[in-house]
Every structure is written in C-alpha cells, then in structure tokens.
Image (cartoon, coloured by chain):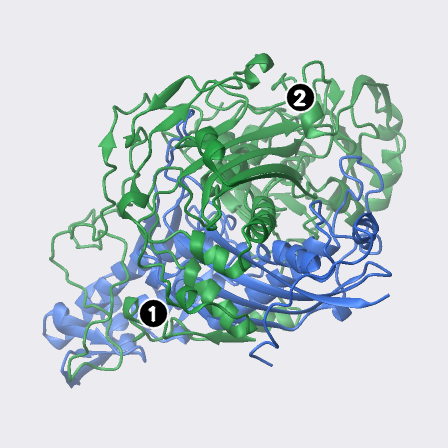
Amino acid sequence: MARHEGRGMASVNYPIGMNLGGDPSQALIHSNPDGKFTVALSAIDLGQGMKQVSRQIAAETLGVPIEDVFVDTADSDTGPHDMGSFASRGTHRMGNAIIVAAREARGVLLEAAAEELEVNASDLVTDGRGNIHVRGAPSKTITVKATAQAAQFKQGKTIAGRGIFLIPLSAVDAETGEMNPNTAFAHACLVADVAVDDETGEVEVLRMTSAYELGRVINPRMVEQQLVGGAWMGISHALYETPEPYYPNPEHGPRDFNEYLMPGPGEIAPYHVTVLERPAPDGPFGGKGPGEMCANPVLPAIANAVYNAVGVRVDELPITPEKILRGIKANGGAKPGPRRGGPVNWR
Amino acid sequence: MLEMRKDIFADERDDNLNVIGKGLQRQDAPGHVTGRTRYFDDHAFEGMLHLKVVRSPHAHARIRSIDISAAERAPGVKRVLRGADVPVNKNTLLSLINFGKDDEPTLAVDKVRYKGEPVVAILADSEAQALAARKLVRIDYEPLPTVFDVEEALKPGAPVVNETYPGNYFEYHERFDHQKLRFGDVERAFSGADIVMEHRYQMSPIEHAPTETNGTIAAPEQNGRFVVHSCAQGLFFALGTTAKIVDVESNRLHFIGGTVGGGFGGKVDSLTEPLAVLGAMLTGKPVRFVLDREEEMLYGSPRGAERIYIKDGVMRDGRIVARYIRSYFDAGAYTRLSSYAAIKCTAHVPGPYWIPNVASDIYVAYTNRCPSTAMRGFGVTAVDFALEVQMDRLAEAASMDPMEFRILNAYRDGDMKPHRRAAKNTALVECVQVAAEKANWPLSEQAKRQSSLTGGAGERGQIPATTVDTKGQIGRPETRTGTATQTLPAGTARIPLSKQPVMEGARDGRAAPTQVPRYEPARPAAAATPAYAPPPYQPASPPAAPSYQPAPPPVSAPASPAQTQHGAVRFSSVFGTRRR
C-alpha cells in the first residue's frame, strides 16, 4: 500500500459577459462643489470587489486621485439600471459604462478649468494628483477643487457624466447554432500535483501552478483574491461537494455545513498564479474579468492528476475515495502513469 | 502567490496608467473587516413580521386540498398566503428578456413538482410562531410518478414534470427539442479519423453555499411605495421580477442592495423578494423572509447537473479533426436560467481549440428535483471538465504529451469558431507555455516557439460546407435520429454581426464622448509629457468612427427572419421588457 504522486493539467477559455449580449449597464458620475466625485450604480458587490474596480476605473478616466472617488451602489432610486453581477460581466460591461460617464464629466471639468485659465480645454491635462495644467506648461495650473468651485458657483456648470454600455442582443440560428456570443475571452492553464493513497482512496492536492490571461488587470490584489478563492472552489467541486451524492437518486441531501463536504483549512493547497495581460479591444483599459473561470481548470486538472497517479479515470464528479478504490480494484491495483517534469519553479 | 508577466503581449499595452493596475485597498475593506458593513439583514423595523413557507414533502404530487384554518388561528399569525393570493402566480425569470414561457408559480397551486416547492406562506409576529403555524397547515397530496434522470425524462411515456413543456424539454426556436451546433461534416470526418473515441461525463449538482443565505426585508414606505432590502445579484432583475409577480408599477418598488454576502449565481432567482413584498402589501407591515441554512442547502436552487457525451476523431499526428457533443442540462422542475446556459454552452463548444468539424446537440431536460440555476461558470464549468479529461485521453491515445497536445490544437487569432465568428485576442498557447515553465513541465523547442498570433486564420478562418438536419422536432421524439437533410455551402452565414456598441451623444449641445474608450497600443512618449496624461478631451470634435470593425463573413446568405425565441427586440420600462 502506498501514496502515489501524480500530475495533471487542463487549459480553458472563458467568455466575458452575458452570452448573446443584450445586457446593458449604466453609470452616473457627479462632482460635489469641492471636486470630489460620486459614482452612482446599481451594480452588485458580492464580495468580488465591484465597488473598487468601479472606483479605480472612474479615477483613472477622470484623472483624479482615487481618494476623491467613492462608489455608491446599489439603490434603485439613485443608481441607473444594470443587468447584474453574474456572467463575469461586471468589470467589462460596467467598466465601459463608467468610462463613458467619467469621460463626459472630465470633459466638463476641463472646460471649466479652461475658462478659469483662459486657455483651450484641448490643451489641458490632469496629473492624477488633483491638478489640471496646460500641457507642456506645468506652471499654468489650477486644482480640481478650485475648478469645481468655479464651475458650481461662478460658471453654472454641472460636472457630471452619464454612461451606458450595451452589446446588442444576438439572434441564434436554429439549424447551425450561429450567433454572436461574446466579444472578449479570458484564458488559463493549470497544473495540479496530487497524492493518492491506494489504500484509502484519499486524494491530497499537493500544489497547483497556473497561468491566467485576463486582459488588463485592474487591481492585481483583487485578481489574486478571485483566482485563489476560485481555485479552492475548484478543489471542492472536484473532490468533495454535492448536494446529491448518489445523483440522479435525490436522497441523502445535506442540510448544513456538517453534512455538506468541503475542503477545510488542512486541505488548502499552495498555489502559484502567473498573470498575463492581452488587453481586450473593447474592454475597459483592455480588462476582461476573472470572475467565474477561476474554478474551471481545477476540476479536470485534478481528475487528470488522479489518473496520472493511480491509473483511474473518474468521469463522474465528485472524485470520492469510494470511486477511486473501486477503480483501483477494477484495474487490479494502482497503475501510476509517466512522471511529468520535476519540482515546480516556485516556492 | 501572484506573479505578473508584463513581458508577454507588452507591445499591445500602454502601462502608463495612474491607478489601473495598482493593488489598492478596497473601498469596502474597512467595513468588512470591522464588521460594520450593512447587509440586507442588518435592517430592523418596528413591528416586523416573519415569513416562512410550507414546502412540499413530495417530489411530484397533485394537491387535492389545502386547509389553512388552524394555521390562521395560531398565536401571532397575521396572514396565511396561498397561490390564489399571488397576483401573477406564473413566471419565468427570463421573461424579462422575452425568452421562454412562464412556467413557475410562486406558490404551487394544482400540483407540486419537486420536494421543497413552496405551497403556503405564513406571516407571523415571530419566526418561532411562523414555524409553529407551519405545522398546522393541512395539505392533502396525491403522489404522482417521478422522474429524476435526464435521459429517462426525455423518453416517450415519462411522467410529465412541467405541463408548460410537455415533452420534458425546453423548446428552442419553436422548432427543436434541443439547441444545435453544426460546423463542417463530423460524420465524414469521423470515418476518416485514425482514432475515434467516445466517453460519458457527469457533473454533479453543487450548492452555492454563500455565507449569507437568500433573504429579503420589505417594508411599506410613503406614496404606496415599498422599500426592499435585497441580496439580489441583479438589483433591477429582482425588481422587475417582483413587479411582475405582485403586479405593481416598477417605481412603487425601491430596492436597496449592492452589498451581498456571497452569491456565486445563487441569488439571481428572486427566491424571496416577491413573497416578502406581497406580504408587506397585504399586511401593511414590514416583512422579513430569510431562508435558513437547511432551506438554502436543499431548496435554494443548486448548480444543475449536466451529463455530457463527447465523441472525437483524431489523426495519428495529434490533430483533432472532428468533435461531437451531446449534453443534457438537468433543469429540475422549472426552467429558471437553464435555457440560457445551454446556448452559452453551445457557443463554448468545442473548447479553446480549432477543430474543422464540430457539432453539438444540447438538451435542457425537466426532472422532479429542485430547479437548478446559475452558478459560477454557468454553462461552461461542466463541459470544461468533460472536454479537458477527454483531451487528456486523446493525448494519451495519440502518444503525445498533454501540454504539447493542447498547443498543437489550440485556437489562434483568426481561427473560425463553430458559431461562425473568428477568434481574436486569443492567448491559450501562451498560458500553456507559462504554466509549463512554472511547473517545470518540459516542452519541446517547437512547442515553446508557438504563438497565438500566428498559425491561425487563412484556411482555418473559413466557414466550411456544413451538413444540417431537422432531427429532434418538438413533439416528435421519433425524429431524434435521422440523417442530414441539406448541405450549406462553404461561407454560409445567416445571423447579422452584432453592431458595435453606440454611446449616447450630447443632448444639450455640449460635446460628449460618442464611443467606448478603446485601449490603444503605447506610442513613443514625447520628451516633455507629464507622468500621467490621458488623451485630452476635445469639446468640439465630431464622433470618431469605431476603431474596431469586425471582418464581414466571406459570404452572406440572406438573413433569416427575425427570431422571436431569443428575445428582447424591444426594451421597456424596467428592462425593457414586454410585460405579459
């Protein structure tokens, strides 16, 4: 009886936004009299970081410091319509709507500054630190705050913007399945190292190594949070979870977290992610979104690693010790596959 | 641990940005870590009632009678609701985008179709009183035959789960019992392949298991309005669904949410909003309806199971020449969003690879289980599991390393996908190369030299001559087998390309941006440019033409007549949707 190590991989892509389009997002942005901005949305922050992604995109486009932007979501009386937070659509759809709104607001801001400085608005730039100045002449300058005050109390201008982003709904051909499903796709490849005990059927995920291509990364810490959390979910889907353990027999459903199996702290595997950025032509600053895909490659990579370790294919999830032991028995013992590569290049 | 590889695709990016790309602390982090963030359930109202539902103990049964008289007299009970009290007691979530038929009651009327289906709702002063009164409701059921297996459900003579779809399948395009994908001629390619392999895969159902269970607090406001504290993943989606079911204008509902304790797809079904609002309307009091953990686990609608059959044809040199997928989505008793997922799955076939002949038949089957719904990777996660295990098998059969096998078959810029749109902005090859390098998985020099930017397009960018068929007509299960009826010539495309998004212009004469800002490659920096200078705003410039123009398909056949099944041609007040 022994523990067999195995290695498997999987590569995937993932569509960004609702399939077929038809899922609009809107944003409204306005400044208070001191040049501090509020972004009003009806997008949902599920914990994934919708508010912060929106905030960074708004601050970048407005050209003001991040501290001068807050995101207010979601109130149906004040936030304009958004389809919702699902289908990995938040960053792409709402991000684009925010850019449109922020550009409009920035346009008024620069017009107001131009009037104060008696120059052309097209000659003005922002420094991202709260100042507006003439391109190539940094001494000819005015603060965003002074500009907002002048716009409000002197010029009678509203520094505000509105934005919508919509990919029109596509039809689908009944006979061929032809359609316009999506405009942006993210990519990933993941390697899982596992150890399988041929006496107990237990699988331990030793470590995972992945590469994700997500378009422009808006906030790397939040990307890390999504990818690492999602990988845990992938381990859980692959090896533990199901509300119907004998599907399609519906019996024996779990009622709480004591009965519903999930990996605990002891089952978390070290994980290294490398992120590539190939900007999406229609993404906000090229952003796509890592929301949903982060669990997807983990399931097959673990299944393939289990096969590499003991020669058992489990084609019905989850991969339980029972299924592995039955497979080993049917094969007349564990049948380890070829070793693939050496120790990982990270610690 | 996260590492950025800025060197790859560096010439496609301008990294001279101010806050994009920075790992800044989240706006909501202090509130979350100090426990001060307010979620829907952090709103207390004086005199708030608690709503609990009585659920069916049977997976399939006729309701002979419902007796609520004892429950109505129970201590603390203010109101007991049955199906007849729900103004519009039949809905389907995607009716908001005109997709599918209304098929699901808020409270079951003649029949229950899954174990746990809500039949009666009780409103009481306390949760304990509502739970106690729940036991006093007497419902007389006549159990009916059940079906739990997706393929059994599709056989003639299977018990009819949901009378709206009497064949136990979702009806596509008012023509077929499944969604088709046809690209090239898979049958001919299989007969010419060196290796043909078919396997069956089964994805399990999964519970979303959010920390915060589904729930809603609704309270009367002034002017006949109601404030609704919601954990919905789509605020206006929940608002629109609720407005339809309780039959009020959308502006009588004031939804507040946006801060949700985990969703993963389990909070798009509006499980609690309509009854909470209806309870508040009928009693004039604030109402709290929150699922407990057991309800969330058993009846909170899981990720649906999928059964997937994949058949592949491969040449000895490792090239995949044909792929056919037959898949069954287990919708449970009602459609919810499964009909959408099957089309998303169709668009995803055959995975991130270029294969010259591809076909799939994807079914949405109804069974007597809790309706399944969206979950992270909806329509894709299960088929990715099946595809990638199949890829591992194919690599072994072709005596190839699994990584090299992926790189050989990876799709690249300009390759035609089976849904007849060219791939662009691809990066699968690079992901495989980088993962191999970090994992110390040796690749051949040839594999290391491959790129997503080259090797695609050309012949791989064409739409092949395609065999089509009329298999699987609605109401005619005997038509599920048969042969191709027609061959469409190479280049045939029938669906117009989606127009690039058009932004609203200025209404008041003030110039406004007229297009989506597009990422533009870095230009050589001028000597005196300040550290940060986004493109200047130009007040008077005319709208620029969109910078991205999709290439037209090689040959455009006459467009088919407008399709009604897929939706919203016209948008109205809330979503724009046509109200029933």
For mark 2, does the 10 Å Cα neighbourhood hold few (<14), some (14 to 19), or many (20 or more) residues? Answer: many
Q: Residue furthest bottom?
A: A139
**Residue depth check, mark 1 versus mark 2: number of the one nearer the observer:** 2
B165 lies above or below A132: above
Q: Amino acid at mark 2?
A: Asn
Residue drawn at point x = 21 percent, y = 48 percent: B505
Q: CA distance from mark 1 to mark 2?
A: 51 Å
Chain A colour in the picture: blue
Position of B457 with respect to B120 (left or right) is left
Chain of the residue that carries numbered disc 2 in the rendered image:
B
Give me the chain that's green.
Answer: B
**Residue A165: which disc?**
none
Left or right for B348, reference B43: left
The residue that disc 2 covers is B162
Residue A300: image quadrant is bottom right
Q: Chain of mark 1?
A: A
The image position of residue A327, as x and y in percent, is: 79, 50
- Amino acid type of disc 1? Glu
The number of numbered badges drawn on the structure is 2
Circle 1 is placed at which residue position? A60
Using residue B317 as the reference point, say whether residue A131 is left or right of it. left
Residue depicted at x 81% and y 18%: B144
Q: Give the quadrant of the N terminus of chain B.
A: bottom right
Q: Nearer the viewer, residue A131 or B378?
A: B378
Q: Is residue B3 visible?
A: yes
Vertical order, B187 against B297 (above or below) = above
Residue B378 figure quarter? top right
Q: Is residue B232 visible?
A: no
